[in-house]
Each structure stands twice: as structure tokens, then as C-alpha cells.
Amino acid sequence: MIFREVEDLDLIAKARRGDVEAYNLLVSRWEKRVFNYLLRLVSNREDALDLSQEVFLKAYRNLPKLDDPARFAGWLFRIAHNEAFSLLRRKRPEGELGPELHTAGAAGSLLPMELSLAVESALKRLNGDQREVVLLKVYQGFKFDEISEILECPVSTVKSRLYTALDLLKATLAPVVLRGES
Amino acid sequence: MNCESYDWKAYALGELDRPARTEAESHAATCANCRNELATLRLTLDTLSTLREEEMPRRIAFVSDKVFEPRWWQRVFSPNFAAACVIAGAILVHAFARPGINDAEVQAQIKAQIDVAVNKAVAEQTESIVARDNARYSQVYKIATGLERQ
């Protein structure tokens, strides 16, 4: 992991000097994570792919503005977060990002296994804020303070959203898990 | 400390520092309720981790995108170009700044050095051959003298 971080820093430095190949390599390392994060937020593969493209384009253009290259991951997900919510706002001008926004898409065809379906379904029952902190913490492995920077909200808010989400997920998934064990 | 003072969600999510983790683990060892709470949380997180990561429908590529090509000045003023400039400058400075040298004088010096080296080598070789021949003559003389006596 350390080596990976060092290499990312090297690639970022090269990309900042206009090395497209270095940036391409950086993209290939992060695109799947960004795509999956966006996919869970917008629940549409084409939208998620278009947004991913836009995220990496913006990231490239703004690389010189990145103060600390070691914080590249959080910075990249901050761009992804902004892009996703910009799209959701355009689709829903009144500004309410209710959970029904995230139930679109053929989840069944994406997730063949019963457990995965149950998780997908449980995640969709969360509201947008709760789901996003779960995605950033559980699936992307960011620390509380990093999530706080990505979402531009206090750590206490991050914890509050995440803890509520975990309680809801625990209640939703427990019957599924117990059924699987019986 | 009572059970409410332990943040098991932070523990399960890896957000506690080592002293806090150790303290929480010591408490869990003696508290069945907290052990159950932690086990349920871990089960939930394990279940969440079964969500399959989706493959991308297609890769994101920028190689052919003009937007991502470096500007002309970025190409020209690359590190390699800068290094080449420094080396070329150093060569030019050296060429103009070094003291003048007479080529004929240098050649004469080199020729003299070569002559000295060749003469020395020839002298050593001659000396070696003479010594060897003398030894052989001496041996032949001894054999011939012995034959005559017989």
C-alpha cells in the first residue's frame, strides 16, 4: 500500500507536468472505484460512466491546484461527489434527493447473488446522505476526517449519518443473514 | 466505565486508536452485551462487503483526447530538454573558456612520449633476447666441450 501511494505520487507529479501516459495509468488505477461509487449514488450505469469521464477530466485540469498530492484520493472523490450531486440536482430541480431517486436501474441484473441483492436493496433504503457515508467508509475505506473533507461537513455529522445508517442496515440485513444461517 | 461509553461502531470501523481499542477489548472480554453488539456490527459489515463491485462497461481513455495532450511549451520545456540545454551550455562554456592549445606542440609531445615508450620496450626486449641467447650459447659450449673430451 505504501509502494502504491508512492507510485501514485510519482504519477501525479508526472501528470502535473503534462505526462498524459502517467495520468492514464492513474486513471486506470482509480476508475473502477470512482465508477462504483458513482454507480451506487446515481444508480445508472451510463450516468455513472459519463460522470466518471467528467470526474477524471476535471481532475486532470485541476491537478495543478491540488495542494497536497498525498490527499489525491479524497480530492478525487470530492470531485466525484460534486459531479454526482450536480447531476441529481439537474434531474430533480426542487433539490430533494429522496431515496426513490436511487432505486432506478436494473439492480437485479447487476447483482445475481441473493446476498448482494439484499445489500443493494438495503442500501437503497437509506437516504442519499446516509448511503454516501456508507459508500465512502465501508466500500472506499476513507477515515472520518477524510469523509468530512470530501462532503464538506463536520466529522460529527459524518459519524451521525454513518451510525444511523449502520443501525438501519443492521435491522434490514439481520433477517436475511439469519435466514441464510438457518 | 459503563457500556455506553464504548463506541463499538468506531471500533468495528477501525477508527479507534490503539489505547482506546485495547481498553474496549478489555471491557468486551468481561461484558456479554458488548460482545453481542460488536458481533452484530461485524456481521452487518461482513454482509455489506458481499456487494459485488461492478466492472466498467468501458475504460476511460484520454490518450487520443486533444484536451489531454501537453501544450507545446510543456513538450519543449520537458526535463530532458532542460538537461540537454545544461549539457550543451557546459560544452560551449568549456570550449570558449579553456586556454588555447597549439595542435603541433601537442602532437610533438605525444610523438616524443610514444618514441620514449617504444625505445624503452625495444631495449627491454633486446636485453631479454641477448640474455637468452647467451645462456643457450653457454649451454651449447658446455655440451660441445664435453663431446670433445670424450
Image (cartoon, coloured by chain):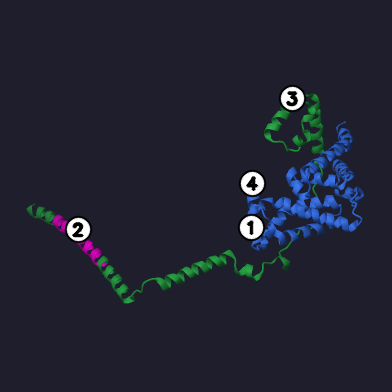
Chain colours: A blue, B green
The alpha-carbon separation of the residues under discs 4 and 3 comes to 34 Å
Residue matched to label 1: A13
Return the residue at label 2. B132
In the rendered image, residue B76, in percent from the top left (x then y), is placed at: 60, 69
Tell me if mark 3 has few (under 14), some (14-19) or many (20+) residues whose alpha carbon lies within 10 angstroms of its own: few
Q: Chain of mark 4?
A: A
Query: Mark 2 and mark 1: span between their CA atoms?
Result: 73 Å
Say which amino acid is labelled 2: Arg
Q: Main secondary structure of the magenta part?
A: helix
Labels 2 and 1 within one chain: no
Give a yes or no on whether discs 3 and 1 share a subunit.
no
Q: Which residues are magenta?
A: B118-140
Label drawn at residue B29: 3
Task: Evaluate if marks 2 and 1 touch, with contact meaning CB atoms under 8 Å apart.
Answer: no
Residue B105 percent across, percent down from the top left = 30, 74
Q: Chain of mark 3?
A: B
Judge depth for marks 1 and 4 and give the one in front.
1
Label 4 belongs to which residue?
Answer: A2
